[in-house]
Image (cartoon, rainbow, N blue to C red):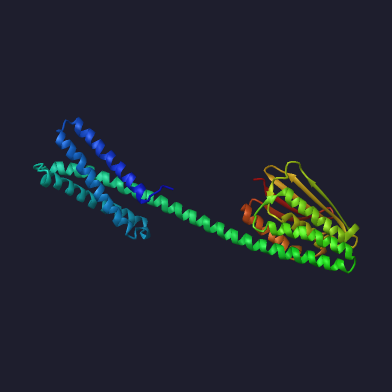
Amino acid sequence: MVKTGDKNFWKAQTIGWFLFVLSNFIVQYLAGLPVKLLLLNTIIPFLVGLLVTTVYRYLIKNSDWRSYSFIKILGAVFISTILLTIVFTTLTISILVFVFKFGEITFPAILANALIFGVVMLNWNMIYFCIQFFNNWNRAELEKWKLVAEIKDAQLGSLKSQINPHFVFNTLNNTRALILEDKDKAREMLLNFSDLFRYALKNTEQSKVELKEELNIVNQYLELLSIQYEDKLKYKINVDEGLEEVELPPMMLQLLVENAVKHGISQMKNGGDVLIDIEQGEGFMNINVKNTGSLKTSSKLGDKLGVGLENIRKRLELIYNGKANLQMKEVNEYVVASIKIPMI
């Protein structure tokens, strides 16, 4: 963005008019004009130009020109250029004639100077308004993206706030069921749960965590569930080397595993397997969570998965802007939840 505060305006204003009168001085010097006339033709246009354009800028800043249409602005620039040229020419010549007694100035000379001053004023107008248009456009873009970012943050905050109650409810429900069967295992389950809940609270404000952190909590979660399901739950985790520091949304992998157990293993009389495969693709990390079962075991599985699956989909859309996706499919008696995440 081009800075246009008062300090920067005066810098540009002074340098711009100095360059104009300097070029004017060189041309007239080469033409062999007397020294007195050279100095007058240099100093007076410099001071008059500064004065006229400064007053003009004050009028612009106090007008409502930003609400004008483009055609109306072009018209205003054209008319103001003519008026500025008349004022500039009149003031300059009046000072030369009435203050410094320069003598009579011919009409052709006045017209020639007016044409030069007109070009200068037109350039001043064009440069000023181009900078203003650029800054207004840039400011509007920044405000737009700031608003988009604020909306995304609010949506992500809302989605994250869903995770903890959802996770806590499911885990406490599992613990409650285990208390009636085995109090010692229930106590161990509560200890594991405290670590899991600490992780969930720690990452509430973060949009991403490293894969190694998420894998650690998933291991703890599966160990916790193994206490409840015993031999009915078998699990295995395979991760390609070098992916440990790739980032992903927190609790996302845990939610996939939770859905695999809740809507897969828990529905099977003899239990089943949960297999987690995390592989590196071309610019992407592919996460596959498989569980024994079938999509046909429940109608409208996507609806039944509720908060977990929908939460993941929305977070992926918000964080990766459509570059990540979640798919559910059935392959060889396994339900597979697949996530593709860009490796940024």
**In this picture, residue 73 sits left or right of residue 191:** left
Percent of width and height locating residue 28:
19, 34
Residue at image location 11% in from the left, 45% down from the top? 97
Query: In the depicted view, which residue is nearer to us: 44 or 129?
Result: 44
**In this picture, residue 241 sits left or right of residue 77:** right
**In this picture, residue 157 sits left or right of residue 259:** left
Query: In the depicted view, which residue is nearer to us: 288 or 219?
Result: 219
Image quadrant where residue 316 sits: bottom right
Residue at image location 31% in from the left, 56% down from the top? 60
Quadrant assignment for the C terminus: top right
Residue at image location 63% in from the left, 54% down from the top? 319
Q: Is residue 31 above or below residue 40?
A: above
**In this picture, residue 326 sits left or right of residue 69:** right
Query: In the depicted view, which residue is nearer to us: 192 or 86?
Result: 192
Query: In the depicted view, which residue is nearer to us: 8 or 62?
Result: 8
Image quadrant where residue 105 sits: top left
Q: Is residue 218 visible?
A: yes
Q: Is residue 306 visible?
A: no
Percent of width and height locating residue 93:
15, 45
Percent of width and height locating residue 6:
35, 51
Percent of width and height locating residue 332:
84, 53
Number of marks drawn: 0
